[in-house]
Amino acid sequence: MEVIEQYQRWKRKGILMVWGGVLIIVIAIGIIAITEHAPEPDFSKLGIHLLLDDGRGSWDIGLWDEHIAYAGDMLPEAGFVVQLVRSDDLDLEKWQGFMDAARDNQLTPIIRLATIFDDDAGLWKPPQADDDGRYTTLAQRYADFVAGLQWHSDSHYVILLNEPNSGHEWGGKPDPIAYAQFVMDVAPTIKVADENAVILNGAFDLHAPNTGDKPFPNTDIYFVDAETFLDKLHNAQPDVFRQFDVWNSHAYPLNFTAPPWEREQGFVDMVTGETNLTQAPRAIFNRSVNGYEWEIWKLSKYGIHDLPIMITETGWRHAESVDDKSLDAGTYPTTEQMTTYLDLLLLGNTNQRIPNIPTGGWTGLLLDERVIGVIPFALNGRPDEWGHTNWLEMSPDGEILGEYPMVELFRSYSAD
């Protein structure tokens, strides 16, 4: 029960941030040589996840240009912006406005295809299958939408849903066989309609436990750990991973609150209460800001190599909020501490440029050549839902009231 309660706090509330602790002592050998050959950060990878519409509520379309312009101001030229689009909202005229605003602000759009949020159940519905169990009809609707948009970027990035190993994202109970079929039907249909489409998987929750044949305690929600889910995907459709052009990862810190150098390997089995270690080398951690390294290792076991990595969610929630009753409330670092963590997440701490902080234990995301995009979550959600997540201070009616220091950090990066 202790493991169960801990995960529940991690995912919904966060856990108490540990400010102290034992610092990691790193012996620096050949420091000059290391410095000379250290990779330079690539700031062009930066992006931000937008919440113009979070699936449950949407800002007035008249405000979208201002929000997108704010993203353009803080990001480098061609910086990435992710925005979900529901399957019941495939309105080409409406979403062309988003695409045009991205163009006007020199941003690269990424469309995350979504289903429909069930307000009564508080979760996302599974995609609608045809009577034969295939997703032919929905696949064509998605494809017509993607192909009908006027893209200004050469690559038309499209994400196929979100964290399908979480019951919150699949009608309460994940279904790896159904998601495998969904991918096999939707990905090629989009590519036929749009030859410039770049298909990304729905990123997985690398912290999710395995609840087995029972729901998470005190809920009706089931979870499947990422390793079990990936194995079942491959068993159901051996070519499923070959449908992806870029591997999408959610690189969240350990327990969603820890500093970037803290990491663990393994998945919690809710049936036994034990943590099941994977067969990955002990230096590869799934619960880590570099959790994609574990995914790369796992994909290699299926014969998939050299997929570029796009991190479409990462970062921390923060203590401050415009709405102190927002649904994402919890015990988090201050925005100042979060900004320091974010800087370390992206650039590492080579030569201890930030004093009294470990220099090892993670790879700076902007220093990893395998990573082509780093997109924290999120800029501009409704304050009653995303008050502790937002990088902007938002009023209930969508007015931008101010910004948190993470924005200025990204602005300084973009100026380099």
Image: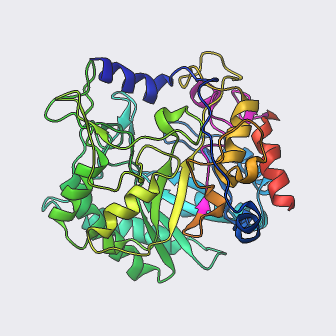
In depth, the one of 75 and 192 nearer the eye is 75
Q: Which residue sits at x=65%, y=16%?
A: 324
Considering the whole magenta stretch, tell me its main secondary structure: loop
The N terminus lies in quadrant: top left
Q: Which residue sits at x=58%, y=23%?
A: 18
Q: How is the image coloured?
A: rainbow
Left or right: 45 with respect to 119? Answer: right
Q: Which residue sits at x=53%, y=23%?
A: 327
The reply to whether residue 106 is in sight is yes
Q: Position of residue 271 (x, y in %)?
A: 17, 29
Relative height, residue 197 to residue 273 (above, below): below
In depth, the one of 238 and 55 nearer the eye is 238
In depth, the one of 207 and 195 nearer the eye is 207
Q: Position of residue 260 (x, y in %)?
A: 58, 42
Q: Indicate the quadrant where residue 316 lies.
A: top right
Q: Position of residue 111 (x, y in %)?
A: 53, 60
Relative height, residue 374 to residue 50 (above, below): below
Residue 383 within the segment the image draws in magenta: yes
Residue 46 within the segment the image draws in magenta: no
Magenta region:
373-401
Q: Which residue sits at x=69%, y=34%?
A: 338
Left or right: 262 with respect to 173? Answer: right
Total number of numbered discs in the rendering:
0
The reply to whether residue 134 is in sight is no
The C terminus lies in quadrant: bottom right
Q: Position of residue 39 (x, y in %)?
A: 69, 68
